[in-house]
């Protein structure tokens, strides 16, 4: 749905902060979104669910919510389900799409089932799986928690003796951990907005891989948009991104990350249902290349709240 007047949104709460390990990034995203909405004349306020209960949204007569929460508790279907119970419409994916999108392994399994290739991986259920991962994936490889964002807990393993410590470290963040092959090609990301794939971005980092520091703290990470892909390759990547999100039930807006294998074939790494909206974030960059400035992007993401059919408050 396209909205013409800011009053059509009613009173809006931007959910930001939260209690996940990505709290600081969420605060940056949420503040940027709030400022953008206010510049567009929308009656918007900040709301941190770490500091007050979501039920306060009803007392504050909030008409809809812009979710800028990252990580577990805000991006995994939890807050989406709570808002459904409260009858408050919200931006982005619903409960199922959010929950699956946060689960990297189930995202992989669903996408592989519909023909979207993903980077080879091995689930590390116990110590006996470590040797299997080394045999099947080789070195170097990555160890990843199953449900963290912003590359939290991600480790690049160069030596066999470092695999067990990396696995044990990832288990501190998530009970589900997997090893993933380190593919040699370039990394790309595709932002999605209201069913449309935006121009892809090629990511180049001076670090050994695109980790938390490269994403948020360094100024030497390079983002190429346009990415330099041929028109057919760009179209193919966009179709894969849309298919991946559709397979997971994700909708409204988001991002899909890929890496190229040795043959130049894109392999899905993960999807993100509430991407960052900071100065270093990729969705605003792709939107800008498509002629959509930050304020318009924030507006269009809020428009996705009209696809949710939350109605009157109802008990859970």
Image (cartoon, rainbow, N blue to C red):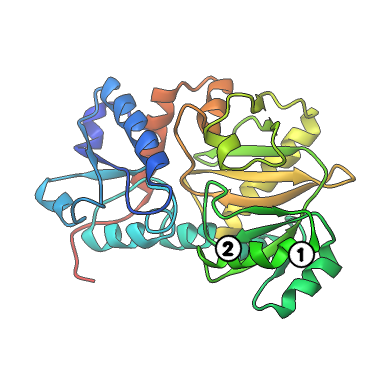
In terms of image quadrants, where is residue 86? bottom left
Left or right of 154 in this view: 86: left
The residue closer to the viewer here, 46 or 184, is: 184
At 51% across and 53% down in the image, what residue appears? 250
Question: Quick check: 193 above or below 171?
Answer: above
Instruction: Say which mark, if any, is on residue 169.
Output: 2
Between marks 1 and 2, how big is the CA–CA gap? 14 Å
Camera-near label (1 vs 2) is 1
Left or right of 24 in this view: 53: left
> Within 10 Å of the Cα at label 1, are there few (<14), some (14-19), or many (20+) other Cα atoms?
few
Report the quarter where the C terminus lies.
Answer: bottom left
Q: Earlier in the sequence, mark 1 or mark 2?
A: 1
At 42% across and 40% down in the image, what residue appears? 25
Element carrying mark 2 = helix
Question: Quick check: 307 above or below 220?
Answer: below
The residue closer to the viewer here, 284 or 174, is: 174
Question: Quick check: 278 above or below 170?
Answer: above
Q: Are marks 1 and 2 in contact (CB under 8 Å)?
A: no
Residue topped by disc 1: 161
At 58% across and 62% down in the image, what residue appears? 170
Element carrying mark 1 = helix
Give residue 80's position: percent from left, percent from top. 35, 57
Question: Quick check: 40 above or below 65?
Answer: above
The residue closer to the viewer here, 9 or 169, is: 169
Report the quarter where the N terminus lies.
Answer: top left
Q: Is residue 1 visible?
A: no
Left or right of 281 in this view: 87: left
Q: Is residue 56 visible?
A: yes
Residue at the farthest left position: 59
Give residue 68's position: percent from left, percent from top. 37, 42
């Amino acid at each position: 749905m396209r909205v013409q007047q800011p009053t059509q949104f009613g009173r809006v709460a931007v959910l930001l902060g939260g209690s996940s390990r990505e709290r600081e990034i969420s605060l940056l995203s949420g503040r940027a979104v709030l400022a953008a909405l206010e510049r567009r004349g929308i009656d918007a306020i900040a709301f941190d669910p770490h500091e007050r209960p979501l039920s306060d949204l009803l007392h504050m007569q909030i008409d809809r919510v812009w979710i800028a929460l990252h990580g577990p508790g805000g991006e995994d279907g939890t807050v989406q389900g709570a808002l459904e119970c409260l009858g408050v419409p919200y931006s982005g994916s619903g409960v199922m799409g959010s929950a699956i999108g946060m689960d990297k392994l189930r995202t992989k399994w669903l996408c592989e089932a519909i023909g979207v290739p993903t980077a080879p991986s091995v689930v590390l259920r116990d110590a006996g799986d470590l040797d299997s991962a080394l045999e099947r994936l080789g070195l170097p490889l990555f160890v990843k928690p199953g449900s963290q964002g912003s590359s939290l807990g991600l480790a690049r393993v160069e030596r066999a003796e470092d695999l067990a410590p990396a696995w044990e470290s990832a288990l501190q963040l998530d009970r589900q951990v997997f090893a993933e092959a380190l593919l040699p090609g370039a990394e790309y990301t595709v932002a999605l907005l209201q069913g449309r794939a935006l121009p892809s971005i090629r990511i180049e980092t001076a670090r050994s891989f695109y980790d938390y520091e490269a994403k948020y703290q360094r100024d030497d990470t390079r983002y190429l948009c346009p990415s330099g892909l041929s028109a057919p390759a760009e179209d193919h990547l966009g179709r894969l991104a849309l298919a991946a999100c559709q397979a997971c039930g994700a909708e409204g807006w988001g991002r899909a990350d890929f890496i190229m294998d040795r043959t130049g074939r894109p392999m899905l790494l993960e999807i993100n249902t509430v991407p960052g909206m900071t100065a270093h974030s990729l969705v605003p960059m792709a939107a800008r290349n498509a002629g959509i400035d930050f304020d318009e992007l924030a507006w269009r993401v809020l428009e996705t709240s009209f696809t949710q059919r939350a109605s009157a408050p109802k008990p859970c």
